[in-house]
Amino acid sequence: MGETSTIASAAASPLLDERALSKLHWRCRRGLLENDLFIEQFFTRFELQLTKRHADGLMALMDLADNDLLDLLLRRREPQAPLDAPEVHEVLAMLRQAGRTAVP
């Protein structure tokens, strides 16, 4: 999914305010450096465009163990139920796109 279509599909969801972004940053702290690199680049690239829908998808991904999250980020596997939701796929695509510059 391209950056334009990602933003367009989230248009109906309100943008996150500064406090919500701060909480989301805190929740996204990980124990595995590789995950942190993806997440750091994600926030660098998309922070000002993040919506409640994106936050919901990202929070679902943050409930995963570090190695499971990394498998998704590196396309070793795709989300399975209950993660197989549109907002999760949308955020995962954004993370992967941002991560292309973070991980060699």
Image (spheres, grey):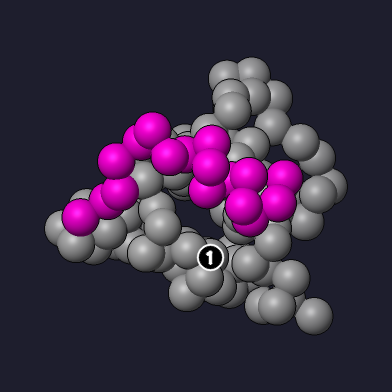
Locate the C terminus and report the quarter of the image it occupies.
Answer: bottom right
Is residue 12 found inside the magenta-colored segment of the image?
A: yes
Name the residue furthest right: 76
At 70% from the left and 78% from the top, the residue drawn is 101
Is residue 31 found inside the magenta-colored segment of the image?
A: no
Q: Residue 31's x, y, as percent?
A: 49, 65
Q: Is residue 27 above or below residue 98?
A: above
Q: Is residue 20 above or below residue 14?
A: below
Q: Read off the residue under disc 1.
A: 42
At 60% from the left and 41% from the top, the residue drawn is 90
At 64% from the left and 24% from the top, the residue drawn is 84
Describe residue 97's horizontal placement relative to residue 17 as left or right. Answer: right
At 40% from the left and 64% from the top, the residue drawn is 47
Q: Is residue 97 above or below residue 13?
A: below
**Few, some or many residues within 10 Å of mark 1 (<14, 14–19, 20+):** many
Residue type (three-letter) at the residue carrying disc 1: Phe
